[in-house]
């Protein structure tokens, strides 16, 4: 199945983030997902909107790219197993990648992880450990398992190969949009630990593309970090975007983002739900709420302009009106109950707290 | 926008159905929709299943192909308006096609048409007339409007250009599957008036591909017609597949299908709902129930084999196990309420009849 040997692992002392190399290596290993469009979404955003449908990716999210690339390089270096922690999609990706390489995988998930993500990780043959609800609890357990087994941890975002792999989705979109004669001037990516948006910034470098990150209200560690000038944790607020809840942006992503990111847009659950419905009913694809957050950010930017940008390098009022906006629709792993609840415009009142 | 002049209209006395010519003309006018796959669906069917995602097509269904081709040829012949009747998607397609050609469009829909389809036809600038619930009532009104305006009727399936255009979806799938090194041996298409499946049979001719049609239980005019040897109407039973309810298969489709179709598979609403959920939760795309019927048929064929085939040229027990099954996922125009109702496995009991 693998026709290309992965490049040698980077010197651990000098992390090398190379989106182009990752994209070359992943070519043929992951789906080159289509760019989708809807005239209704174009009208709402007031620009041509290209949606990179990574919800159609193997494993149901773009995390597959980072997982495959990082695990593939570890396999090439002789490792026989890997350990990962995440709120879900990265764990699924590492589990699937490990199976492709006949490696053992242990993935550490929060006790309230989305059941379908737990099932997908188990289905890929991984040992699943459910621990607490914070990244610190999961990291402590992952480190202990790594020490016991000797298997390295593939961090969900603070890892050069994961950032490079996730960035390949943005690079494909940038290249395909150029090929179609509609180059991007704006690129919008949801932010959890910041790996995907950091990869997007690197993919867009050398081109006149403004990259924005989108964080849920109250899960805005990147916005706080950009203001403070260093990674700054928050206590994540509840959100339907379960994949965007890390308490702190990663150090390596932050180093990349601090000078390159145009800005952060904060979106609330209603805005995410509206974007989810547009994607479902107009584009005809299923996104998970975290995956729909990018479109929610694009809609907010279109409605409110620079006043909606809370941190980053953009001066207030700067930037001309975008003509072609790329949005990474990062994933589609969502529970049927939530789909039923979000599909209709008014959220039904719940007997229990959401 | 149009780089290719459409070929001259066919001699009305000698209908020419030419899927290859239609595919050539439509190239660049419609989306070449992707072939999607899911390992879960492959496992359930026991074969490689390629799903042609025509729900992502402009207008939300493959009817756009037949509408654009037929209306384009009429525009080239100097007509300034068109009339169409359908349960929904064909009307939307004709309305959108007429707008592209600056032609007037009048579309006749049943009074209980899916509201989103009515809205889409109106949004495309068509005059929408809502009439009765049977095809006979709609046809009578369409003929009167055609007489009054002098604008020709573009029939939803009994029309050579409509059949040719709809067949182009199957031809693209056949060609793309060959290019990927996984040629189809089986091709499964939902049946309303029979235009799409007739086009599929023509697209598959010269190749060793078994083509099956799928009809909802009680809306099985094609099955009855194949047994009787002539187009035979039924009184359509209620079904969630609103696009597959014509009371009778078209004469021209029947002429094509009688010697070419391998067989008909009948599916009930629960089987369609299960296929809808698989497409949504595993493939991450939204199909309308009529669009999901093809996958429902593939699952039934896989589970029950030839015993499930109710009419056609297939001898009982004939045919080897399929290796690569193509399914045309014909459309995705569905109401949010129905999505919410179908998304979860158990259909909630309704206070009113469905």
Image: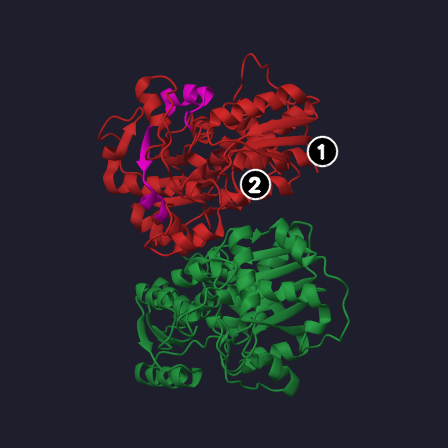
Chain colours: A red, B green
Residue A248 belongs to the span the image colors magenta: yes
The magenta span reads: A247-273
Residue B275 belongs to the span the image colors magenta: no
Q: Nearer the viewer, residue A320 or B152?
A: A320
Residue designated by label 1: A102
Residue at 44%, 50% (x, y): give it. Answer: A338
Locate residue A127 relative to residue B14 in the image: left or right: right
Up-down relation of residue B125 to residue A350 (above or below):
below
Q: Residues within 10 Å of mark 2 (few under 14, many from 20)?
A: many
Residue A281 in percent (x, y) is at 40, 56
The subunit letter for the residue under badge 1 reads A
Q: Earlier in the sequence, mark 1 or mark 2?
A: 1
Residue at 55%, 72% (x, y): give it. Answer: B191
Image quadrant in which you'd find residue B350: bottom left
Secondary element type, mark 2: helix
Residue at 66%, 59% (x, y): give it. Answer: B325
The subunit letter for the residue under badge 2 reads A
Residue B162 in percent (x, y) is at 49, 71
Residue A54 in percent (x, y) is at 50, 42
Residue designated by label 2: A118
Image quadrant in which you'd find residue A208: top left
Image quadrant in which you'd find residue A129: top right
Q: What is the quadrant of the N terminus of chain A in the image?
A: top right
Of all residues, the one furthest to the front in this rendering is A351
Up-down relation of residue B155 to residue A101 (above or below):
below
Looking at the picture, do discs 1 and 2 lie on one chain? yes
Secondary element type, mark 1: loop
């Amino acid at each position: 199945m693998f026709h290309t040997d992965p490049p040698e692992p980077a010197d651990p002392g000098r992390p090398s983030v190379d989106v182009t190399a990752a994209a070359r290596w992943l070519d043929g290993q992951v789906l080159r997902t289509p760019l989708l469009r809807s005239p209704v979404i174009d009208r709402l955003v007031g620009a041509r909107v290209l949606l990179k449908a990574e919800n159609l990716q193997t494993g149901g999210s773009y995390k597959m790219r980072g997982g495959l690339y990082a695990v593939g390089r570890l396999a090439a270096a002789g490792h026989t197993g890997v350990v990962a922690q995440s709120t879900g999609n990265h764990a699924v990706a590492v589990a699937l990648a490990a199976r492709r390489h006949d490696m053992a995988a242990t993935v550490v998930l929060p006790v309230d992880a989305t059941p379908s993500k737990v099932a997908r990780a188990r289905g890929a043959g991984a040992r699943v450990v459910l621990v607490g609800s914070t990244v610190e609890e999961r990291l402590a357990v992952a480190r202990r398992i790594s020490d016991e087994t000797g298997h390295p941890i593939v961090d969900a975002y603070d890892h050069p190969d994961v950032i490079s792999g996730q960035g390949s989705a943005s690079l494909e979109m940038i290249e395909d949009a150029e090929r179609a004669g509609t180059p991007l001037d704006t690129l919008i990516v949801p932010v959890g630990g910041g790996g995907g948006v950091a990869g997007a910034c690197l993919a867009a470098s050398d081109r006149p593309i403004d990259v924005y990150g989108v964080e849920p209200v109250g899960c805005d560690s990147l916005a706080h970090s950009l203001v403070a000038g260093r990674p700054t944790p928050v206590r994540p607020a509840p959100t339907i975007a379960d994949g965007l809840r890390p308490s702190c942006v990663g150090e390596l992503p932050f180093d990349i983002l601090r000078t390159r990111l145009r800005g952060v847009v904060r979106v609330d659950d209603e805005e995410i739900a509206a974007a989810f419905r547009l994607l479902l009913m107009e584009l005809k694809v299923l996104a998970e709420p975290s995956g729909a957050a990018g479109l929610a950010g694009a809609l907010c930017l279109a409605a409110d302009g620079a006043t909606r940008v809370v941190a980053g390098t953009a001066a207030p009022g700067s930037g001309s009106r975008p003509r072609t906006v790329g949005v990474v629709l990062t994933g589609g792993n969502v529970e049927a109950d939530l789909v039923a609840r979000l599909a209709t415009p008014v959220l039904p009142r719940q007997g229990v707290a959401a």
